[in-house]
Amino acid sequence: MYRDNTKVVKIGNKVIGGGNPIMIQSMTNTNTEDVGATVAQIHVLERAGCDIIRCTVPNEEAALAIKEIKKQIKIPLVADIHFDYKMAIAAIENGADKIRINPGNIGGSEKIKAVVEAAKERNVPIRVGVNSGSLEKEIVEKYNGVTAEGIVESALDKIRIIEDLGYDNLVVSIKSSDVMMCVKAHELIARQTNYPLHVGITESGTVFSGSIKSSIGLGLILGQGIGDTIRVSLTGDPVKEIEAAKIILRTLELRKGGIEVVSCPTCGRTKIDLIGLATQVENMVKDYDLDIKVAVMGCVVNGPGEAKEADIGIAGGDGCGVLIKNGEIMKKVKEEELLSALKYELDNWNA
């Protein structure tokens, strides 16, 4: 497994690489300088399961805000920097646990050196980020367009720039909105560097389409043992990014914990509001710290059999339903009591 052999990097109170658990990241969409709004959003994301948070630092006010934000959150904070090397240095000085830069867009060698020196002084990791949309003109021309090989060459070049300055506390991120190009790029770079990799499909789209594209891309990459942190980049509420990431990791058996909900598709036998019921169950179980599988089935004919692999489940009939445990019907209840019956069992699961 590639991730077992990557360099171990400490980010605040978290450790990535070297076979450590894969961390879920997200990014705030508040104005970072608005400390109250930013902290409030981070707290929501923390509760949802975010392990590492990233905030943009476009100006000095945002850099200064990091110090106050850090006092009020528990998870590591990554400062996202574009173009202005001074913001990277200011973010480090104000307590950022990691900085994200593209050495190709923050200025010449002296500016890069200044950032690296500041990071080295405080042992702050640098995430070297390269996106397919920001490849150098000469690399695009060399490969006759944007390619996985070009993305990797650009990233390795940026890594060498920082290594030549005597620093190797690095995390690498190579992203593309082209899913299969992104997969190929990760396969290539995993064989050429042992730095931890932050994985994601950039600009993947809305909650619906973006979750699908990210699931395919991350599934193909993580399934090969590549990747140490992930972000599901969605145009929507950042909490949805966390929820999607948790499902992806659970499905790949890379993370345990949390209730998995399985539900059957609707058919002509369905006599209850299965779509509404399944949605209610999915929302309800988010607050439980139980490593179990819950089934929501549409009929009492096939429901018990189909739910055998689940720890507990409910199946609806015509105005009524049944509570199922390990494939066995435990009791019959009215349709409107199905949700509360399930909740009672979950509340008393370890009693």
Image (cartoon, rainbow, N blue to C red):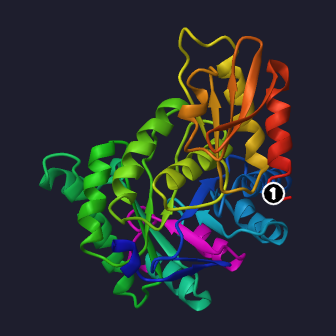
Residue at image location 34% in from the left, 79% down from the top: 194
Q: Which residue is mark 1?
A: 39
Vertical comparison of 251 with 164: above or below: above
| Left or right, residue 211 beside residue 220 | right
Q: Quadrant of the N terminus?
A: bottom left
Image height of 174 relative to 156, above or below? above
Instruction: Tell me the SS state at disc 1.
Output: helix
Is residue 232 one of those drawn in magenta? no
From the image, which quarter does the C terminus lie in? bottom right
Camera-side residue of 265 and 81: 265
Highlighted range, magenta: 86-110
Q: In this view of the protein, can residue 56 be seen by the observer?
A: no
Kindly tell me whether residue 158 is visible in this rendering.
Answer: yes
What residue lies at 60% left-to-right and 27% top-to-bottom?
303
Front-lying residue, 296 or 104: 296
Residue 60, percent from left and from top: 70, 63
Figure quadrant of residue 227: bottom left
